[in-house]
Amino acid sequence: MPDGWVWDESLFEGAAAYYERGRLPYAEGFAAALADALGLDGSGRLLDVGCGPGTVTVPLAGWFAEAVGMDPDAGMLARARLRAARDGVGNVRWVRARAEALPAGLGRFRAVVFAQSFHWTVRDSVAATVRGMLLPGGAFVHVSDAKEPVSTAGLPHPVPPYAAAAFRHCRASLPGIHVRRRLPAAGTRRGTGGIPRYGR
């Protein structure tokens, strides 16, 4: 986060009800893909930081003995509880807190997930804290939204040309932490000059 930035409690106020239908979805089958990649077997604990309305926490919870969804917004956590109840998921504990409050007495985890939330944190200190919360062999996971819509039927505008953005992927690893960075194609001014702008 930029120096001097201060968290505003009203930042997401009233947004929770629109998240499930308004945000880009995560890839179909992401939970099973992650379970396969990490060898999940229903044991261990999951922490989802910046869990929002439980969009990732709830589908992943069944792959763990216990899940903890953490978010600073009370409205998001209320929607997450509703989603868990609707889907019959009972092994999730919901905690209202910011990532900077970690470890917050939450214990240790097999996996800590940031689904489109890591950029909202003071990344260096949060990453260092999370590393200490991981069990040996545990994983720091970043989940991104699906860049190509499953269906374009009924969309009011053309689909943005994601392929034209020509992002390269660079993967850097530390023991227990896996970070995936998105780097803009070489030659773009400040990483955006060659990428068409959509919306405001």
Image (cartoon, rainbow, N blue to C red):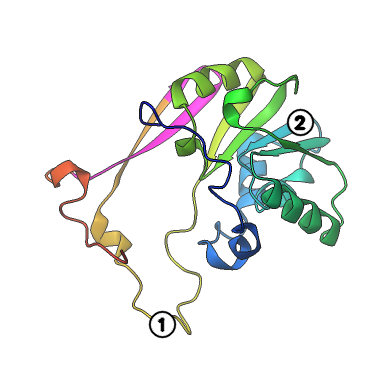
**Quadrant of the snapshot with the N terminus:** top left
Q: Which residue is mark 2?
A: 45
Q: Position of residue 166 (x, y in %)?
A: 25, 53
**Quadrant of the snapshot with the C terminus:** bottom left
Q: Position of residue 151 (x, y in %)?
A: 49, 76
Residue 36 vs residue 53, the one in the foreground: 53
Amino acid marked by disc 2: Arg
* Element at label 2: strand
* Element at label 1: loop
Residue 5 vs residue 69, the one in the foreground: 5
Residue under the point 62% across and 58% down = 14
Q: Is residue 54 left or right of residue 84?
A: left
Please state the extent of the stretch shown in magenta in the rendering: 173-185
Residue 12 vs residue 111, the one in the foreground: 12
- Measure the C-alpha gap from mark 1 to mark 2: 41 Å
Q: Is residue 136 visible?
A: no
Quarter of the rendering containing residue 41: top right
- Residue 139 covered by magenta stretch: no
Dominant secondary structure (helix, strand or loop) of the stretch shown in magenta:
strand
Residue under the point 85% across and 42% down = 91
Amino acid marked by disc 1: Pro
Q: Position of residue 125 (x, y in %)?
A: 49, 19
Residue under the point 42% across and 59% down = 147
Q: Is residue 181 left or right of residue 18?
A: left
- Residue 178 covered by magenta stretch: yes
Q: Which mark is nearer the camera, 1 or 2? A: 1
Q: How many numbered marks have been drawn onto this rendered protein structure?
A: 2
Mark 1 crowdedness (10 Å alpha carbons): few <14, some 14-19, many ≥20: few
Q: Which residue is mark 1?
A: 156
Q: Is residue 139 left or right of residue 155?
A: right
